């Protein structure tokens, strides 16, 4: 099969046995790869009676047919499983070079089950895999583990967990270089399996169906992106800090306020700490930041992304970018999602302010925040409670209506009162509150995708958002099956041509939404098996209250209207959330109808 290595490595850690399963052409033609193929495969493996942290729960690393090729911005991989944080579909997406090197090692993915009797790491090379002892790596931070493994395997790339994953913090991440598969606790699953790291190396390459056409289109597309994405290249994702604050989209004080001076934490401020930029595999943009903090004796560390600046900056009323950068370093070294971790600290601080918690937390307290980050990772004192995530923590203290989460996943740092369509995205995303499952920000600031019938509208208008969100979800699901980064705005017809030139398939632009819908509905069926309830697909009450002094004024998302429109378009039952039999037949998902 062109574009694929043709096989997925399977590892049973309990039995210390490795084997292979072949990529099935029929599944590839319907789900492509990445999170699409992962959804189809994991649905068949799903046993809803198996706890997410049980040895039997599979963990899947997956690439797509464009991963590791010349196609721009395709240096990504996805990690999927049933989430220990939400109990439903879990998915984390990361850039860097691990995904490309995974394919170079001879595999499209790695399916892991079981639990090792002692700490282990996997070493993949040239179509083979060994299970190695990792006892000497257990307890160490992600930076140290990668350094020590690189000394032993110099040409490999690594995906590793830190102490948070070992201690089963429910939002533990998986780190490769300074890129992070952060959301949904995929690092927690690794820790539960006593799997400390995965090393991948090799020089194998997938065959390309039409090499000349593929190369020409890949290079011309990269040239266009290099020309059009200059701000992202110059400032990284911190470019959005000023824009987000102007739009009242950036959270302040656990989403309670709208105004905060961000001049000291924006893209220009980050540029003053910059030592160099870096790019993921085959990326012409290079949005990664490497910074220096001389006062702290830190040089060559990763600069914080927008989400982290918001999580530990505005949301905690903190305006010291160097402190935020240290918190970013702490989370990455310990192996934790900065969105969930920052949200938990803000939630606890909010409860202290309300008198519902007696931990004496205050806003803008960098020293206490750093201490809490470490306490969460090592499950010490209050950190042990925060390590459980918003839903469980709120339930313990009877403050469920104050927790900013959807289906157990903490709200990302975008306010749905500033972009009402985003509120619907949070409510219906397979992962829970995820901002990356539909690109509503781009659409609602005026970017149309006319080839797919996606049209921009007023960001504060509810009408038409149900259909737009569904189409954006389907487009993003197609993206995540290739896999391509979310930042470049590559036209749909170009994506299809790259896929066809690479694999020899015969997709057309109109197939994008069909493939995406098939993937979205498969994840839906996965979640329904896991016990998803329609009544939980809603925004938390605080985000349905107007913010005083905000640009949106008294406008809040009309969730009922948008949900009804969305469900009608999807052909999902409004009471059960199940796709109709007609929709399953249309998508050729009748094998999932149970």
Image (cartoon, rainbow, N blue to C red):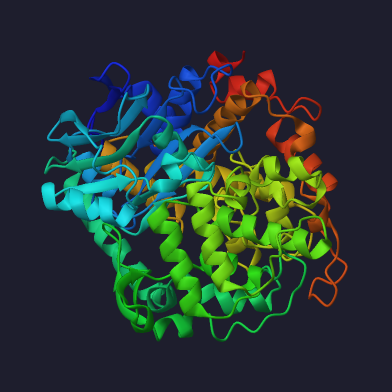
Q: Is residue 515 above or below residue 469?
A: above
Of residue 558 and residue 494, the one placed in the foreground of this image is 558
Q: Position of residue 144 (x, y in %)?
A: 27, 55
On the picture, is 588 further left or further right than 228? right
Q: Is residue 488 above or below residue 388?
A: below
Q: Position of residue 145 (x, y in %)?
A: 26, 50
- Name the quadrant containing residue 34: top left
On the picture, is 219 further left or further right than 188? left
Task: Please give the count of numbered marks on the rendered protein.
Answer: 0
- Residue 67 in view of the camera: no
- Residue 113 in view of the camera: yes
Residue pushed farthest right? 554
Of residue 15 and residue 537, the one placed in the foreground of this image is 15
- Name the quadrant containing residue 593: top right
Q: Position of residue 457 (x, y in %)?
A: 71, 63
Q: Quadrant of the N terminus?
A: top left
Residue at image coords 29%, 23%? 10
- Name the quadrant containing residue 251: bottom right
Q: Quadrant of the C terminus?
A: top right
Residue at image coords 46%, 18%? 45
């Amino acid at each position: 099969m062109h574009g694929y290595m043709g096989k997925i490595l399977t590892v049973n850690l309990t039995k210390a046995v490795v084997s292979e399963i072949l990529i099935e052409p029929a599944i590839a033609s319907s789900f492509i790869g990445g999170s699409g193929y992962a959804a189809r495969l994991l649905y068949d493996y799903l046993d809803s009676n198996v706890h997410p942290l049980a040895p039997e729960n599979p963990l899947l690393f997956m690439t797509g047919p464009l991963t590791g090729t010349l196609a721009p911005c395709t240096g990504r991989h996805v990690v999927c499983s049933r989430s220990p944080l939400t109990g439903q579909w879990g998915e984390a997406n990361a850039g860097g070079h691990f995904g490309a090197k995974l394919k170079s090692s001879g595999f499209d993915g790695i399916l892991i089950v079981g639990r090792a009797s002692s700490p282990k790491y996997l070493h993949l090379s040239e179509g083979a895999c060994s299970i190695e002892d990792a006892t000497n790596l257990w307890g160490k931070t992600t930076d140290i583990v990668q350094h020590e493994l690189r000394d032993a395997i110099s040409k490999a790339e690594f995906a590793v967990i830190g102490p948070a994953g070992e201690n089963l913090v429910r939002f533990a991440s998986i780190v490769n270089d300074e890129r992070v598969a952060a959301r949904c606790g995929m690092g927690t699953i690794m820790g539960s399996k006593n799997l400390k790291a995965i090393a991948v190396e090799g020089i194998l390459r997938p065959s390309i169906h039409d090499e000349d056409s593929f190369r020409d289109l890949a290079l011309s597309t990269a040239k266009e992106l290099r020309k059009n994405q200059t701000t992202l290249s110059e400032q990284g994702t911190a470019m959005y800090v000023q824009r987000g604050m102007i739009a009242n989209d950036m959270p302040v004080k656990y989403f309670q306020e709208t105004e905060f001076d961000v001049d000291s934490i924006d893209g220009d401020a980050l540029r003053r700490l910059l030592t160099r930029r870096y790019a993921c595999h085959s990326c012409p943009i290079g949005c990664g930041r490497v910074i220096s903090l001389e006062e702290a004796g830190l040089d060559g560390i990763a600069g914080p992304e927008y989400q982290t600046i918001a999580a530990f900056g505005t949301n905690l009323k903190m305006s010291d970018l160097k402190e935020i950068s240290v918190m970013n370093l702490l989370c990455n070294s310990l192996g934790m999602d900065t969105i969930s971790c920052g949200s938990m600290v803000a939630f606890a601080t909010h409860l202290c302010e309300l008198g519902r918690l007696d931990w004496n937390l205050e806003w803008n307290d960098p020293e206490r925040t750093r201490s809490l980050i470490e306490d969460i990772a090592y499950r010490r004192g209050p950190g042990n409670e925060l390590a459980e995530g918003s839903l469980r923590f709120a339930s313990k203290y009877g403050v469920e209506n104050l927790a900013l989460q959807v289906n157990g996943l903490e709200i990302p740092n975008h306010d749905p009162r500033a972009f009402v369509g985003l509120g619907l995205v949070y409510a219906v995303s397979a992962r829970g509150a995820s901002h990356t499952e539909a690109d509503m920000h781009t659409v609602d600031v005026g970017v149309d995708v006319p080839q797919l019938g996606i049209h921009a509208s007023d960001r504060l208008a509810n009408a038409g958002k149900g259909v737009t969100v569904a189409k954006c979800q389907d487009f993003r699901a197609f993206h995540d099956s290739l896999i391509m980064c979310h930042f470049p705005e590559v036209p749909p017809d170009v994506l299809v041509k790259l896929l066809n030139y690479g694999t020899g398939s015969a997709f057309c632009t109109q197939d994008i939404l069909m493939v995406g819908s098939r993937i979205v509905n498969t994840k839906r069926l996965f979640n329904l098996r896991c016990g998803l309830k329609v009544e939980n697909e809603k925004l938390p009450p605080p985000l349905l209250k107007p913010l005083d002094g905000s640009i949106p004024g008294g406008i809040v998302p009309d969730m009922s209207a948008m949900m009804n429109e969305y469900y009608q378009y999807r052909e999902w039952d409004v009471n059960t959330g199940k796709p109709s039999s007609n929709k399953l037949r249309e998508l050729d998902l009748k094998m999932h109808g149970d």
